[in-house]
Image (cartoon, coloured by chain):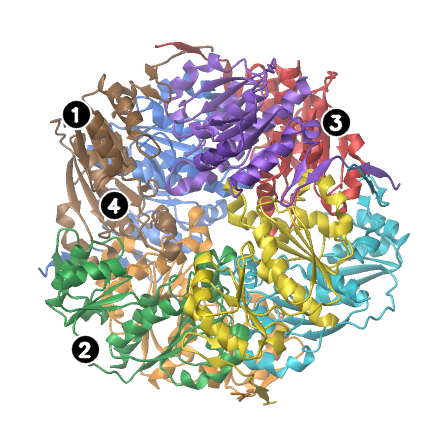
Chain colours: A purple, B blue, C brown, D red, E orange, F green, G cyan, H yellow
Amino acid sequence: MTENVKVPPFENLDFACVDHDRAIRQGVGEVIFAPGKTADQIVSIAQNLLQSQSFALATRVSEDQYEEAKSLFDQVHYFKTAKIMRFGAMSNKKLDFSCGVLSAGTSDIPVAEEAAVFLEHYGVQVSRVFDVGVAGIHRLLARVDEFNTCNAVIVVAGMDGALPSVVGGLLACPVIAVPTSIGYGTAFGGITALMTMLNSCASGVAVVNIDNGFGAAMAVLRQCNQLK
Amino acid sequence: MTENVKVPPFENLDFACVDHDRAIRQGVGEVIFAPGKTADQIVSIAQNLLQSQSFALATRVSEDQYEEAKSLFDQVHYFKTAKIMRFGAMSNKKLDFSCGVLSAGTSDIPVAEEAAVFLEHYGVQVSRVFDVGVAGIHRLLARVDEFNTCNAVIVVAGMDGALPSVVGGLLACPVIAVPTSIGYGTAFGGITALMTMLNSCASGVAVVNIDNGFGAAMAVLRQCNQLK
Amino acid sequence: MTENVKVPPFENLDFACVDHDRAIRQGVGEVIFAPGKTADQIVSIAQNLLQSQSFALATRVSEDQYEEAKSLFDQVHYFKTAKIMRFGAMSNKKLDFSCGVLSAGTSDIPVAEEAAVFLEHYGVQVSRVFDVGVAGIHRLLARVDEFNTCNAVIVVAGMDGALPSVVGGLLACPVIAVPTSIGYGTAFGGITALMTMLNSCASGVAVVNIDNGFGAAMAVLRQCNQLK
Amino acid sequence: MTENVKVPPFENLDFACVDHDRAIRQGVGEVIFAPGKTADQIVSIAQNLLQSQSFALATRVSEDQYEEAKSLFDQVHYFKTAKIMRFGAMSNKKLDFSCGVLSAGTSDIPVAEEAAVFLEHYGVQVSRVFDVGVAGIHRLLARVDEFNTCNAVIVVAGMDGALPSVVGGLLACPVIAVPTSIGYGTAFGGITALMTMLNSCASGVAVVNIDNGFGAAMAVLRQCNQLK
Amino acid sequence: MTENVKVPPFENLDFACVDHDRAIRQGVGEVIFAPGKTADQIVSIAQNLLQSQSFALATRVSEDQYEEAKSLFDQVHYFKTAKIMRFGAMSNKKLDFSCGVLSAGTSDIPVAEEAAVFLEHYGVQVSRVFDVGVAGIHRLLARVDEFNTCNAVIVVAGMDGALPSVVGGLLACPVIAVPTSIGYGTAFGGITALMTMLNSCASGVAVVNIDNGFGAAMAVLRQCNQLK
Amino acid sequence: MTENVKVPPFENLDFACVDHDRAIRQGVGEVIFAPGKTADQIVSIAQNLLQSQSFALATRVSEDQYEEAKSLFDQVHYFKTAKIMRFGAMSNKKLDFSCGVLSAGTSDIPVAEEAAVFLEHYGVQVSRVFDVGVAGIHRLLARVDEFNTCNAVIVVAGMDGALPSVVGGLLACPVIAVPTSIGYGTAFGGITALMTMLNSCASGVAVVNIDNGFGAAMAVLRQCNQLK
Amino acid sequence: MTENVKVPPFENLDFACVDHDRAIRQGVGEVIFAPGKTADQIVSIAQNLLQSQSFALATRVSEDQYEEAKSLFDQVHYFKTAKIMRFGAMSNKKLDFSCGVLSAGTSDIPVAEEAAVFLEHYGVQVSRVFDVGVAGIHRLLARVDEFNTCNAVIVVAGMDGALPSVVGGLLACPVIAVPTSIGYGTAFGGITALMTMLNSCASGVAVVNIDNGFGAAMAVLRQCNQLK
Amino acid sequence: MTENVKVPPFENLDFACVDHDRAIRQGVGEVIFAPGKTADQIVSIAQNLLQSQSFALATRVSEDQYEEAKSLFDQVHYFKTAKIMRFGAMSNKKLDFSCGVLSAGTSDIPVAEEAAVFLEHYGVQVSRVFDVGVAGIHRLLARVDEFNTCNAVIVVAGMDGALPSVVGGLLACPVIAVPTSIGYGTAFGGITALMTMLNSCASGVAVVNIDNGFGAAMAVLRQCNQLK
């Protein structure tokens, strides 16, 4: 019963093992998580990744990191609300796959944009529907047509986190819920919204970490991989 | 600036200080919390209260406590789902005040009934609307007429606790939210529903303790006191 | 059993769906939650709301947001302690409804003021009774006359959050308890006071989120809607 | 901007609003959550659902509930490990969609089976791979062929909840992680596994509530709805 | 700077190191904590202790443990409400020291009795004042004379745990607060009362563990040791 | 049974009800909690208190608050480590009462000093024994003589909070344990130390809030009141 | 950079993947965790393991499981306090390695015995030192000679969990701390002891899960593997 | 049974009791924890320690503290990533003992370096293997040869904290797991990683406090003490 397992390629920089095989294994290449990294380190990893991919993305990039990276590398683009930085050129890929990105409030938009911008880089058609929280349920119902034919929906909400329960009950497609840290007091930095979503009375709603728009986009891209 | 404060009447039983003045101070006489009390103690307090009121209520009464109390006192009535026991006769009082009592699920009904039965003893007209959780939002919207002219609404929900946020957005009257311990895993025995409700994106929703149907009814009766 | 549900009017700004019908549905128009919004966005929403209301309120407004808003819009007033900003003119509406606003300590006053200032904009007569925490119970008892004829009482307390239990036992009117984040160590930013209030041994005390003076005011205004 | 929204059909039993439209809206008809319901209530709802579907499923059914239901209704089948009860006949539907169901340990099997049995009722081809936790990583790697061509994978794990992180790194398809309440002490009834999964260093892993095998199956079925 | 430290006498039973010196070091001999011990073990330790003291006490003794212990040892007395068992004879010691023992509710009495019975064995004069919770503040104020000349006060309360804050504000003597596990939902088995007490706005209130009447009595006895 | 209760004197400043009777009721006059108050407010309250006491203390005073207060009032003294500010002259009172103040580490000294400085203002003889945590148990044992004849002991510790358990086992006098917020990670800002202390295996150890050196001093002063 | 990794042998029973290589990889063969397994399953796995090892151990075995296993397999031995069951014969292996196993209280003994019995099966010389909690620090100091020459020490404690801090300060060898679920109220089923141990002011104390005597023994056996 | 216990030497500075005997008792001399200490205090303690040791280490030293210390003392060396400062000369000691130090991600390197640098000062041969988290399990497997002959392994991980479970399953030597505060949302500053590690399905993994690289190094040095 002893067998062999193949080890895919990676490269050992000093401070990071860059994973060149991830695009094959997971459908999306390695993404750079910017917090705690210097602009130097971000650019190094990006350059290394660009050897095997046409563009590389970094998430949670501060404006300072962007400014410094821009001085180190030519082809950098920064999405300010989404805090995403792209090295290299945008691809032209267009999938026959649409995804609604809903937010409960105005303050949840940055997290929603992280998901939306990320998806657009991989060819997903995104439909943004913002500020449709359940306290004015008519606003949501009036805009159902903007997202009810989508292949997946990402629902971003803070405070009471109730929106995915309602959306999950209206739609048959995958619903990925993203709690945000918006709120105060017992919002507990997103824990309340997270718990609400995990207990959604609409069944089959799947959840990612607080403020994790990127994770939600990745969950949807995993679904896209199956459509191809 | 030294003044005197009047001390209202009470009676010191061995194990309890019965408060004969509470009906005047709070609009509703002292209510017996049954858990941890013997049937004997419950009946003693009830008899003491019946000296100054026409009926006395006990909450969270088990069937065993009821059976034993029935053998000790003649005029006892038991509301099985609500777990409320009444000593003495039902009053005929009818207030010009209606209250909707909504539940998100079937399992939340006992808590909703505790509120409803309690309110009916004080003359409130109760409108029960059960199993209208937000996963099937159309069920709620189709039944809005049953509660949107009420003077107050009590909304009982476990799991995601999202119903009060939607109801609070539909109505202008007071909304008292009651989280229930229904659910499993991260429902945390009602904590998740409680936190959802405290963070309701519909403003002015007030909340009581987990499974506290009685407390919600009392909050509504405090409002009734002002209408008289 | 298939029916139609009417969708009330709202307006889709880019970053917000402004709810023009809320004053009808909830008795009070949409209120702007300032944190995380630019002064620009606040003013845009306010201007949009002023199309259908005579004044618009924003809560939790920083002095910086106020200064910038003032440069963008003429008729702005700022309540510094309450951190409330009003666009448009104060109304002259006076309701036959009074509300006590009590605070346990000096540090709880900003939250109490948020509630008080908000209520006054909708015509409620407010009676402020500050620094009457239970460690000096005589201070509270000596001032009972200032609030015991009110139609509702808002009780604001941090630290041990014990004041609403005592006040709830003295009065028959609705009592809305507001925990504050005042305290240190095991005050846990208001969680302890919140939990105390949810477990108030005075029955029928309803609770809102930590530091949520606005929510308490809204709960009282829901009650006012019934009196009209 | 006032519009109408259609209300889909449902039926108001006394204790439940049965949702006849859910199969259309969500791809799967209403499922009966058995805990806290009497066998009578379960059978009533099932009979009502069988008016519009060929079979109805109940989850978390105890052996006692099954025994009683069997005496009330003819065509009942019970899946003992999965605790699922089916009313009516199994369908013959076979989708061109396969789903791996992995468990980290032997004790996680009941939750894994709840997911697997549920999926099989809707035509999904299930590949069970049990007891492949990361403490013996070779066991997982040796069996990769059993699940790496699936269209989705459900990963069930208690204790450290680490399995989805490894699986998510190996595969490009959707990965739904289910924490279980298996473990003791700081396993905290599944909270630790849940938190591990929400923080999975493999991106795009989506999570459902503790022990919620049914929810994971529903998340996968939402994906199936898009493939048809 | 190397010195020697004296080791006081103790005896190593197989399962316990009995501490014969504790009465000297701490003023009260070793007390047997009954849960998890067999009646046999309890009696063995008691017999060992009776070699150096005239009586020995065990706390949290179940009725079963008492029944069995009674069959193994002659001179045993059981205090049913307090769940205390005494081996040997009551002492006649009477200290010139009085302690009030207050309870907020009827259900808190067992914990209060554990403290009271314990104190009485060491000669303290105990004044019991039960069911004087703050929801009926007049009941407390009317009975102030029963405890305001005491040398110390133990205040026992569950639910909101607010009583010590009021009592601490009325008295100059030491106040030991004991939270109890009475309550439901967010009472969290006494955690809420504990947190309230630790945040008491009356200063100098000291707190012991939940339901720890014995610990409160010991804290008072430490004070007695100083008076001798 | 209706009685009268006397209301002691207090004064209603705008933002505070100053309690002139507290020195009589609690043995120590009202103490000003500085955080969140302006230097102006602190000085106003102090001046008001100095009408009935010879000095007034404020706790948790920042250096900025002190600098500003010094410019507003002549007789101010600041204890930098203890963060205590005194208005008026030090009293000469010397009680026949000594209190040990122990700290587990160097970083716990500010909290220990808050207790020590406070006690010294009321005539208590303080014995400071710092940096004697249990990881070097010999350091504690070698210094036992410095505190084992005291009338009370305050034990201040962060991190594991284990020191009071050892000290409580060595001494017969009252032991007041003060958890501090020193530590990192799972020290949880003092919660771990607090919980350790509440579960002290030495019985009769009483506990106050995290970092609450003042509260511990007040608990000891309550004991002093009985000695007089 | 693509390489191959060898997969060690294991066997796929239906409900378990038995790991025959673990004794080589980890020094100790697979151990059966009994809870949630039938006696049948336990015996099957044990028999499978006995193909490659001379004995097999199961932990947390109930007396019922033992009774049933005994009827299915001949050579079974049960350690009642430790709740360990051995299949096959005890080995005669004796290592030149000694381990102290200390417990703070009598109630912690079952966890201590799980560690001790386990170690003895692998040839470790165990020194048991029970009931030496820090409230009587002299008991610990007087018995230091029984464990201060050991190669490792396991320290088992519930309640305040303070013992490892003191022991860690006395010894230079590895100290493995095991929190137990002994205690009540804020002992939180062992969480408090765990947190105390993680914050031990003696450095280099390593910690395992609550009540995990087996895990502590395994940590020590990992150290033994290095000595061979 | 009364015995004497020797008290080892220490020195009482004003603010600290310096422990000169610790190198004998614990194998490693006292280490200075820098946070909250002035550069002055750090240098004083270091100078005192250098009386009995050839070098002294301080941990968690900020760059500011280093700059100031450098101006006060000649022979100071600062390890920037590890935040360790050494007073005196590096020793030449080389043990026949190797330790792997693994990190899951790039951001965990500072904690890993604290452990590695510390170990190297005591002669341990350290093998650094960074950024080998389980999401790319092949990276870990490909580098097994770099650490599988070590005498101990320290595994540092944040976020899901899953790496020690996999490593513990691959190796027979001691595994010390260090959770880090890396992550966001439900990473809870390292609590999630800590809980994962305490529940590791690989047995015998021992855990230290969050970000406590120093503690892990000390645990390994305790093992070294036994090898000598």
Q: Gap between marks 1 and 3, in whole Å?
A: 66 Å
- D52, G94: nearer the viewer: G94
Q: Gap between marks 3 and 2, in whole Å?
A: 83 Å
Which residue does the numbered mark 3 point to in the structure image? D126
The subunit carrying tag 4 is: C
- Quarter in which the C terminus of chain G is drawn: bottom right
Question: Which mark's residue is nearer the viewer, 3 or 2?
Answer: 2
- Horizontal side of B140 relative to A220 (left or right) equals left
The subunit carrying tag 3 is: D
Question: Which mark's residue is nearer the viewer, 1 or 2?
Answer: 1
Q: Are marks 1 and 2 on the same chain?
A: no
**Quadrant of the rendered image containing residue G58:** bottom right
Which residue does the numbered mark 4 point to in the structure image? C155
Regarding residue E182, the answer to whether it shows in the image is: no
Name the kind of residue labelled 2 in the image.
Ser
Please report the residue visible at 80 percent of the width from the left and 31 percent of the height from the top.
Answer: D145
Question: Which mark's residue is nearer the viewer, 2 or 4?
Answer: 2
Which residue does the numbered mark 2 point to in the structure image? F91
Question: Which mark's residue is nearer the viewer, 4 or 3?
Answer: 3
- G112, G38: nearer the viewer: G112
Which residue does the numbered mark 1 point to in the structure image? C74
